[in-house]
Amino acid sequence: METKIVVKIKMLEGCEDIKPLKAHHDDAAFDLKSRVEMELKPGEPHLVPTGVFMEIPIGYEAQVRPRSGLALKHALTVLNSPGTIDAGYRGEVCVIILNAGKNTYSVKRADRIAQMVISKLPDVEIEYVSELADSKRGAGGFGSTGKN
């Protein structure tokens, strides 16, 4: 049986009504909401504050991702998707949103702007070597495998 992970969340004063929540109990992600009203101009990155401060257990991260409906209907995306929130970060969670559309998009307070997934990190050890094993792909990248 898997152990439940506890992520502590503190809300900025006056933001208790916009806590990160899952729309359904079996959803993978928590909705992040804007704590401000702002205009997102096309072609520009915008930093949207959420009023959320977190204490994530060591060995975990929070990943901030775009909302599919906003991406499809309004061409809004999280610019550094997925944005990573490290366990040691204690500042306000803000979302870098890019309006890739043609029209200015109005964000209202409490609008759902992104989603957040809590993920376990693998225990990774880096080994520095002078040679790497050959592979079928080799150094090919950036489209080297074709469209199939």
Image (cartoon, rainbow, N blue to C red):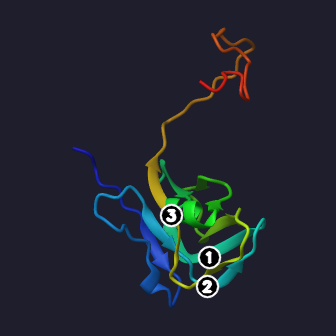
Tell me the distance, in whole angstroms, between the alpha carbons under discs 2 and 1: 7 Å
The amino acid at mark 2 is Val
> Which quarter shows the C terminus?
top right
Q: Are marks 3 and 1 in contact (CB under 8 Å)?
A: no
- Residue 147 vs residue 54, the one in the foreground: 147
Q: Tell me where residue 116 appears, x and y as whole percent.
A: 49, 61
Q: CA distance from mark 3 to mark 2?
A: 20 Å
Q: Nearer the viewer, mark 3 or mark 1?
A: 3
The amino acid beneath tag 1 is: Pro
Work out whether residue 44 can be spotted. Answer: yes
Residue indicated by mark 1: 49
Circle 2 SS class? loop
* Residue under pointer 2: 36
- The residue that disc 3 covers is 69
Which of the two labelled residues, at mark 3 and mark 2, occupies the earlier sequence position?
A: 2
What amino acid is found at the position of numbered circle 3 in the picture? Gly
- Which structural element holds mark 1? strand
Sequence order check: which comes first, mark 2 or mark 1? 2
In this rendering, the answer to whether 51 lies above or below 23 is below
Look at 56% across and 78% down and name the residue there. 34
Quick one: which residue is furthest to the right in this view? 43
Question: Looking at the picture, how far across and down is residue 72, in whole percent?
Answer: 56, 60
Question: Closer to the N terminus: mark 3 or mark 1?
Answer: 1
Confirm or deny contact between disc 2 and disc 1 (CB under 8 A). yes
Question: Of 138 and 148, which appears nearest the observer?
Answer: 148
Q: How would you rate the neighbour count of disc 1 (Cα within 10 Å): few for under 14, some for 14-19, many for 20 or more?
A: some
Q: Is there a contact, CB below 8 Å, between mark 3 and mark 2? A: no
Q: Nearer the viewer, residue 130 or 50?
A: 50
Q: Position of residue 41 (x, y in %)?
A: 75, 74
